[in-house]
Amino acid sequence: MIEVKGLSKSFGHIQAVKGVSFTVTKGEILGFLGPNGAGKSTTMRMITGYVPPSDGRVTVGGHDAWEDPLPARRLIGYLPENAPLYTDMTVRAFLEFVAELRGLEGARKKQAVDRSIETCSLQRVVHQQIETLSKGYRHRTCLAQAILHDPPVLIMDEPTDGLDPNQKQEVRTLIRKMGVDKTIIFSTHILEEVEAACTRAIIIDRGQIVANGTPAELKRKAPQAGAVVIRVAGVAPEAVEGALKGLGTVRAQADGGVVVARVEPKAGSGSDGMAGEVFEIAKKGGWSVRELRTEEGRLDEVFRAITRPDTVK
Ligand SMILES: Nc1ncnc2c1ncn2[C@@H]1O[C@H](COP(=O)(O)OP(=O)(O)OP(=O)(O)O)[C@@H](O)[C@H]1O
Ligand SMILES: [Mg+2]
């Protein structure tokens, strides 16, 4: 549905996006991650056809986003970073106005406006002037205008920014629900959001893609992923350390009557199977095992390791 090929954008001497390529298919919810200034918004603006690429191209449903923008834009609902709103209109009047711009009239217009209001839970404020709305409701009004024409593609730039935790949760649920039969790209700085809502994530740093995979695949790249923690009784920490040190870096300490040991696998040995080896060693040594688990990687560690490797211990 969305195809991005060798996309680049320069503003004077600033290279905001440098040769980015990826595709997104129907039913995918792609999370766009990256530090401030990474090029997320610029990439989204090029996908929605608001900014011309310096190089490369974007097609949406087969239409070139810049050369053939009208059919491409018809397929897209866009929530920009700083969405403009007509603040002296009421919510309903604004949505009706946007519906008219989208070519909807009469019963179809009413239906579209009602559906957006319901989807974004705006019923309580439909007759309120936009300038008197709280930030969260303003934000939902922007979201409502983006989905008004029920587009098959949604591009949302930080859709949960500035919302309270309940509203963030609501928007994530909404994204997941809409993602079933749409193609969605959204950017965020919140890593739990990627785990909660995305089928795939791309990490972009200094204009380039540095990781592309499912949240689970990305988590496995965490420096801590695959470490095994074991709690045993009836054995000294030194003995545990000695028995396990062939597997990787071991730290064992006494905690009350038990010993807790953490084994970090050797670099490049992957995260599969070490728990089994630890268990065999424990069995051979006759240790009384109280707990044995493999640590999952954390997305924030992956993010930091990839985008700022110098800050990771
Ligand atoms: N219109 C513009 N003119 C000049 N420079 C720009 C323009 N738009 C973006 N840039 C620059 O391009 C780079 C990427 O910006 P962009 O807004 O795409 O980042 P972002 O990943 O969305 O960051 P954030 O997380 O802060 O929203 C930045 O260095 C920014 O200053
Ligand atoms: Mg941005």
Image: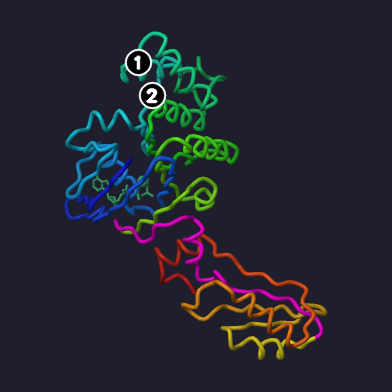
Tag 2's secondary structure?
loop
Label drawn at residue 149: 2
Please tell me whether residue 177 is drawn above or below residue 121 in the rendered image: below
- In the image, 263: left or right of 148? right
Using the image as rendered, state which of residue 309 and residue 283 is in the foreground. Answer: 283
Please tell me whether residue 9 is drawn above or below residue 227 in the rendered image: above
Residue at the (51%, 39%) spot, across then down:
176
Which three-letter amino acid code belongs to the residue tagged 2?
A: His
- In the image, 12: left or right of 46? left
Is 228 covered by the magenta stretch? yes
How far apart marks 2 and 1 lie (CA) works out to 8 Å
Please tell me whether residue 104 is drawn above or below residue 144 in the rendered image: above
Colour option used: rainbow
Is 303 covered by the magenta stretch? no
Magenta segment boundaries in residue numbering: 207-234
The residue at which mark 1 appears reads as 104
